[in-house]
Image (tube, rainbow, N blue to C red):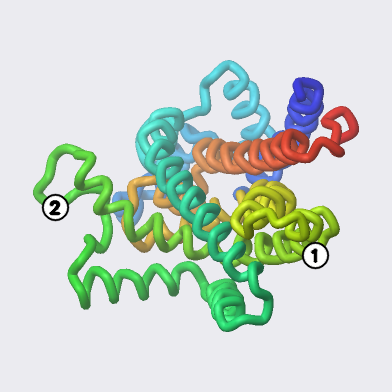
Amino acid sequence: MARLAGRRALFAVPAVLVVTFGVFAIAAASPFDPVKAYAGTAALGADQETLDRLRDNLGVDQSFVVRWWNWLTSALTGDLGHSGVLRQPVTQVIGERLVWSALLCAVAFAVAVTAGTLLGVLAARRPGSMLDRAVTSLAYTLEAAPVFWIALLAVWLFALQWDLLPAGGLTDTASEQVTPGQLARHILLPAGVLAVSQLPWFILYVRQGVGDALAEDPVRGARARGIGEGTVLFGHALRSGLLPVLTLIGSRVPELITGALLVESVFSWPGIAAATVEAATAVDFPLLAALTTLATAAVLVGNLLADLLYGLFDPRVKHSEM
């Protein structure tokens, strides 16, 4: 296990280098002017000399290769630079927002895995039944629905029509502190929408895996020996049927991050979504590179976690061969 983690860490180094270099290259080709984004409305009345001076102070005239190298060498010492658009150190920007994004993704992922496993098992128990057709139809429908459309529909239904849950934010309007009760109420809609967007894949994978396991000889033998249906389903078939789901965990991380950005934007959730959008539109090189590196690291860790879990639950797979 340690050797696998070490090999993946060595692979992560060139991957991060390529990703961050690509970010600086793409940002340099962007039509947005970082100087005007930094100055805001003051840039409208500023003369060219002032703008040129500001451009020189920000180092915008340097080539993107030089800016990338300067950022990289500083990042290795723990200095991720200063966000020009948010007027804060990048580490502070990420630190203030990452915890809320991580909480949202963790809750949504846990709900999606739990609900998807339960529905997938129920659908696989009797293939072709009314329940199976209903669950699979629901999965295919949700798979085709854009996450922002689900989010807007949830706001219209639960916040505007029924007035059951708040439409956005982290706390109530007049509140100055984040309390557990307010946090629980405000996270229900965004986490639920994000979970629903991830639900179809877990339903379909579990249904297929458990259905295949129920047709295997060991499971048939267990039924022939008179073992209870619940034990056969959850003790034998589910164990084998969940193995493909473990690989799905790593592959869903990029989609989870993308969905979280859209959900956070719709529900005004104080995560890294707003910072990502502002960094992209303002060509904020340090912040954009740090957020992209963070997303890349999340994807690599997700893939590593999936491989580790697969090796732990399937004795036929050896970590040394991965």
**Residue designated by label 1:** 215
Q: Quadrant of the N terminus?
A: top right
Per the model, the C-alpha gap separating discs 2 and 1 is 55 Å
Which residue is at a point 63% across and 56% down the rendered structure image?
228
Asked if residue 176 lies left or right of residue 235, the reply is left
Q: Quadrant of the C terminus?
A: top right
- From the top left corner, tell me how far across and down residue 219 is, in percent: 77, 56
Packing grade of label 1 (10 A; few <14, some 14-19, many >=20) is: few
| Towards the viewer: 30 or 125 | 125
Which residue sits furthest right? Answer: 321
Q: Can you say whether 171 is above or below 129 in the image?
A: above
Tell me the tag on residue 136: none
Q: Secondary structure at mark 2?
A: loop
| Towards the viewer: 91 or 190 | 190
- Given contact means CB atoms under 8 Å apart, are the residues at marks 2 and 1 in contact? no
Which residue is at a point 85% across and 32% down the rendered structure image?
318
Given this view, does label 2 or label 1 mark the residue nearer the observer? 1
- Sequence-wise first label, 2 or 1: 2
| Towards the viewer: 163 or 298 | 163
| Towards the viewer: 38 or 101 | 101
Can I make out residue 154 in this image? yes
Packing grade of label 2 (10 A; few <14, some 14-19, many >=20) is: few
- From the top left corner, tell me how far across and down residue 76 is, in percent: 62, 20
Looking at the rendered structure, the kind of residue marked 2 is Thr
Asked if residue 228 lies left or right of residue 183, the reply is right
Which residue is at a point 9% across and 49% down the rendered structure image?
174
- From the top left corner, tell me how far across and down residue 31 is, in percent: 56, 59
Tell me the tag on residue 173: 2
- From the top left corner, tell me how far across and down residue 79 is, in percent: 52, 22
Q: Secondary structure at mark 1?
A: loop
Which residue sits furthest front? Answer: 226
User: To which quarter of the image does residue 82 belong?
Assistant: top left
